[in-house]
Image (cartoon, rainbow, N blue to C red):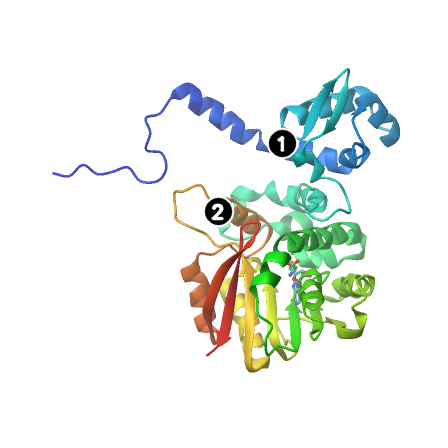
Amino acid sequence: MATEMPRGTDVAPSDPAADVAAVFDLLNGLVAAQTLRALAALRIADHLADGALTAEEVAEREDSHPRATYRLMRAASSLGLLSYEGDHRFGLTGRGRLLRSGVPGSLRSLVLTQTGHSHWQSWALFPEAVRQGTTQTKKALGSDIFEYFAQPENADEAALFAQAMGDLSGLVAQGAVAALSTTGVSTVVDVGGANGDFVLALMEADPRLHGHVLDLPHAVDSARGAAEKRGLSGRFSALAGDFFTEVPSADLYLLKTILHDWDDTQCTQILRNCRSAVNEGGRALVVEMVIGEIGKPDFTTRADMTMLTMTNGQERDLDEFDALFAASGWRRSTTYPVGGGYFGMELVAV
Ligand SMILES: C[S@@+](CC[C@H](N)C(=O)[O-])C[C@H]1O[C@@H](n2cnc3c(N)ncnc32)[C@H](O)[C@@H]1O
């Protein structure tokens, strides 16, 4: 009789000491995350950008407690975020450099968003989200996450979130722009486009294109500002609207990290609205992470936990995406990696 094989990744014999260390390591993920947060909040990477400093020098610039700043920087050096140069002097490693502000590829806003009030309060209710199968943001924050960002008192957090999305767009925009053909396209709508970084990158690559961002009213001003900064205002507009109600007509829709925010019914509604408004021969490009084989190391399954905590959305595998596309009048024609763990899925109307 054939022996039944164990499933999943836990096929090696267990080593109790290593198992304890591994669980401690996982648990300390929260310490690592808050160490990143403090480094970002105190702008330590910006202070070290021109060379190593002592913790006391950083504390003086930031008006923080010198001994606590030293302890933070010591912990950060043991996490590979700072280098230790001796005599209380610390420098930046490659990882630490990612926490600088205002530089291409910066992850500072993402760190501050994902470890900030809205996310941290919601994570406190995570087991309840699993019990009920739905985000607990209403209980944690008083509203869903996008309503929370729209409230004037949360404008700073909303701006950080938009910046974080823009920075992530920077990671994938280059790959997506290089892979995507804009032949036959003159109008592009970035659906839920936030700062517009994605459509603006596409417009820079193809000077014939007219681009639009459709987003909630609180988000569109920053998109206008971004277009102006890049000298693209003449070919750009930012429209305040609701993608569940209507999207403007276009030859190409960009939906980057939109579908993962919503459940299947809501995604189908967004995609149907694009399908009914798309011009003859038009297309859509969906950019998302894609869940791979179960039981293998897969960052996307962890991102999926964030979606469960913060939204009623989810990360999906290719079959799940195809089911959404089929239900809304689209067919996936090509799929390619665009960098940063994201995939571009091009859709044609059927
Ligand atoms: C996860 S962000 C993605 C932003 C952008 N596509 C990117 O990848 O950088 C989701 C965006 O959808 C917008 N959004 C949420 N609900 C919306 C709605 N009902 N209509 C239009 N935009 C909406 C949010 O304001 C936010 O900018």
Give the x, y percent position of residue 153.
80, 53
Q: Residues within 10 Å of mark 1 (few under 14, many from 20)?
A: some
* Foreground pick, 35 / 348: 348
Q: Residue at x 60, y 51 (%)?
A: 310
For badge 2, the amino acid type reads Thr
Badge 1 marks a residue whose secondary structure is: helix
Q: What kind of element bears circle 2?
A: helix
Relative to 94, does residue 158 appear above or below in the rendering?
below
Give the labeled residue for mark 2.
301
92 relative to 12 in the view: left or right: right
Q: Quadrant of residue 257?
A: bottom right
Q: Is residue 127 left or right of residue 106?
A: left
Compared with residue 257, is residue 203 higher up or lower down, i.e. above or below? below
Asked whether the viewer can see residue 142, the reply is no
| Mark 2 and mark 1 residues within 8 Å of each other at the beta carbon | no
- The residue sitting at 82% across, 24% down in the picture is 65
Residue 136 in percent (x, y) is at 59, 50
Looking at the picture, which amino acid does disc 1 mark? Ala
First along the sequence among labels 2 and 1: 1
Kindly identify which residue carries mark 1: 32
Between residues 186 and 188, which one lies in front from this camera angle? Answer: 186
Quadrant in which residue 261 is drawn: bottom right
**Who's the residue at 48% across and 28% down the image?**
23
Estimate the x, y position of residue 321 in percent, counting from the top left: 46, 63
Ligand 1: image quarter: bottom right
Counting from the top left corner in percent of width and height, residue 101 is at 77, 43
- In space, the residues marked 2 and 1 are separated at their CA atoms by 19 Å
| 10 Å crowding of disc 2: few (<14), some (14-19), many (20+) | many
